[in-house]
Amino acid sequence: RGTDYIINEVKTSGLRGRGGAGFPSGMKWSFMNKPSDGRPKYLVVNADEGEPGTCKDREIMRHDPHKLVEGCLVAGRAMGAKAAYIYIRGEFYNEASNMQVAISEAYQAGLIGKNACGSGYDFDVFM
């Protein structure tokens, strides 16, 4: 259904960022959904856990890393990004290991990479 459909669904859902500001995700994504100027677009995921008192990034990577990979694919498609780069702080060794397994499994299943999900859209995830 396309990028506009994805962005409108996210706006309608009321999804907000899990950092301190709680910024509306659909609005943030719409800023990136612009006509191409020829330069590639990238999605950057900051899983540093830098906000005081938060544990959201670590918990997702520890217990459901596939959800983060799927979120990268959906957000990347909505923004027209060709790849996602996930930053994880060095102390999160086990979580980084979990993420790498989930990323590898997603590549093996054809969910990301060339022709992600059989859609004609190429999307890579790097950590």
Image (spheres, grey):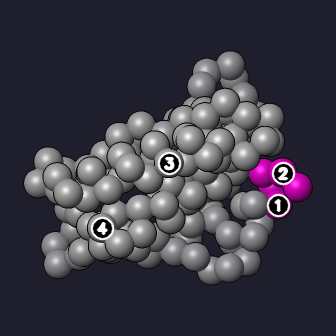
Amino acid under label 4?
Answer: Arg
Q: Can residue 68 be spotted in the picture? A: yes
Magenta span contains residue 121: no
From the viewer's perspective, tell me whether residue 90 is left or right of residue 77.
left
Disc number at residue 62? 4
Residue 95 in the image: state x and y as whole percent: 25, 58
Name the residue beneath numbered marker 3.
105
Amino acid under label 3?
Answer: Glu
Residue 86 in the image: state x and y as whole percent: 37, 46
Label 3 crowd bin: few (<14), some (14–19), many (20+), radius 10 Å:
some
N-terminal-most mark, 2 or 3? 2
Amino acid under label 2?
Answer: Gly
Q: Residue at 55% across / 71% down in the picture?
A: 24
Q: Residue at 46% across / 43% down in the picture?
A: 104
Disc number at residue 87? none
Distance of mark 2 from mark 3, alpha carbons? 25 Å
Name the residue beneath numbered marker 2.
2
Magenta span contains residue 3: yes
Asked if the residue under mark 1 is in contact with the one under mark 2, i.e. CB atoms within 8 Å, the reply is yes
Depth check: 127 or 11 in front? Answer: 127
Distance of mark 3 from mark 4, alpha carbons? 16 Å
State the extent of the magenta-drawn residues as a range.
1-5
Mark 1 or 4: in front is 4
Tell me the element at label 1: helix
Mark 3 or 4: in front is 3
Name the residue beneath numbered marker 1.
5
Amino acid under label 1?
Answer: Tyr
